[in-house]
Amino acid sequence: MRSQQGRSLAKYNTRKAAYDLRKFRGKNLVQRIANSRRYRVQRPGIRTLAALFILREEVLKPVLAGVCRPKRGRPPNNVHPLDLHYQTLQRQMLSTLQYLKLAA
């Protein structure tokens, strides 16, 4: 796995993996296969893990990437409805961070 991901997983060591497995087992997302060191992902766990991954990659990262850097200049003529949702999320996130005094 580390060789496939390159440097991004360079700091991901066995201690972190053991911690993650304990968390997943505690939430019944994975189950240990008897008499082995392998784990099996439970069916509801697959849905939960996929939903968390999609939420992180498709929603949180784009929103947080643009929250502190509002775009300057004229807006485009045709704005996709999804872009409007992202802009609303970014404005709300910025106001939340300002309220918490985490952003200027």
Image: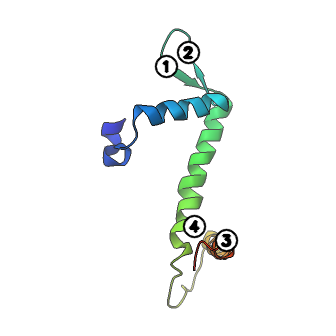
Residue closer to the observer: 63 or 93? 93
Looking at the picture, how far across and down is residue 60, in whole percent?
58, 60
How crowded is the residue under tag 2: few (<14 C-alpha within 10 Å), some, or many (20+)? few
Q: Give the mark, 2 or 1, whose residue is nearer the N terminus.
A: 2
- For badge 2, the amino acid type reads Ile
Type of residue at label 1?
Arg
Amino acid type for the residue under numbered disc 3? Leu
Q: Foreground residue, 86 or 10?
A: 10
Query: Upstream in the sequence, badge 2 or badge 3?
Result: 2
Residue beneath label 2, please?
33
Could you give the CA–CA distance between mark 4 and mark 3, rounded to whole angstroms?
17 Å
Image point (59%, 78%), residue name: 79
Coordinates of residue 78 in the picture (x, y in percent): 58, 81
Residue 83 quadrant = bottom right
Label 4 belongs to which residue?
Answer: 63
Of circles 1 and 3, the one toward us is 3
Identify the secondary structure beneath mark 4: helix
- Where does label 3 land, which residue? 100
